Image: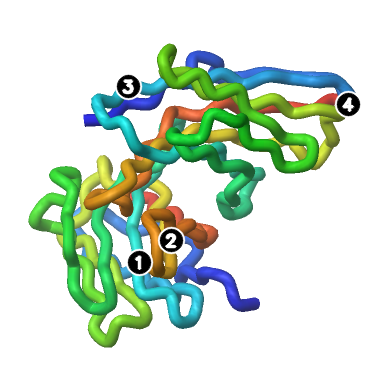
Amino acid sequence: DTGVSQNPRHKITKRGQNVTFRCDPISEHNRLYWYRQTLGQGPEFLTYFQNEAQLEKSRLLSDRFSAERPKGSFSTLEIQRTEQGDSAMYLCASSLLGQGNYNEQFFGPGTRLTVL
Amino acid sequence: AQTVTQSQPEMSVQEAETVTLSCTYDTSESNYYLFWYKQPPSRQMILVIRQEAYKQQNATENRFSVNFQKAAKSFSLKISDSQLGDTAMYFCAFMNSGGSNYKLTFGKGTLLTVNP
């Protein structure tokens, strides 16, 4: 399968613990995005990378959140000192920036985080 | 900032019939893209159809078509000959063209159920 993959698919943790999610984009896609989707809402943009550079972070991304894409391939999203309000589906997407303005984002299956 | 509004939280349709999902948006931009994404239960989100704002002609993809009214900032999705596999959450989304052509802004979604 050459689509976007995310691991783990589900994560249950206790409040105050740290968690890390991984996203593997479609090979050769140079843009990678993280979104958060809470129950009953559409996905909300968190951050995005072009190659290894993190170019924008949403105000939704508090200082407990950090994302990396060290070699311009896979990405990790870490949440420190988790809170119950962090419970959500975390979606990763990737795209290929090419000529023109449009680059379709392909989504992964998401990581569902539950903070007890 | 852009906003996307989907006023129908849930809809249902009989198999083989036609259904229309509504979406309105607000932006001060003149060039942008609009999308409908489908998120089946426990599966990843996929792009259904895309519309460039500068194109007057409505986009179509097989059984899926849109009614794009730029002046009214309206972007509805029509699904013809509904199939059981169309059962999913449908999200309307907006993306600027140009410099900020990376961030998707989603509506809250419409849960569509196709009944046999």
Name the kind of residue labelled 1 in the image: Leu
Residue topped by disc 3: B26
Establish whether labels 4 and 1 are both on one chain: no
> CA gap, disc 4 to disc 1?
37 Å
Label pair 3/2, CB-CB below 8 angstroms: no
Mark 4 and mark 1 residues within 8 Å of each other at the beta carbon: no
Label 3, label 4: how far apart the Cα atoms are: 33 Å
Q: Nearer the viewer, residue B68 or A111?
A: B68
Residue A44 location, quadrant: top left
| Side of B4 where B37 appears, left or right | right
Position of residue B1 measured from the top left corner of the image (x, y, whole percent):
21, 30
Mark 3 and mark 2, same subunit? no
The answer to whether residue B26 is above or below residue B94 is above
Residue A89 at x, y percent in the picture: 42, 49
Mark 2: amino acid: Ala
Q: Nearer the viewer, residue B83 or A15?
A: B83
Q: Residue at x 60, y 31 (%)?
A: B57
Residue farthest to the bottom, as pictured: A71
Q: Residue B89 appears in which quarter of the rendering? A: top right
Q: Which residue is mark 4?
A: B15
Q: Is disc 4 on the same chain as disc 2?
A: no
Reading the image, the residue beneath label 2 is A93
Q: Residues within 10 Å of mark 4 (few under 14, many from 20)?
A: some
**How far separated are the C-alphas under marks 3 and 1?**
26 Å
Q: Say which residue label 1 marks.
A: A32
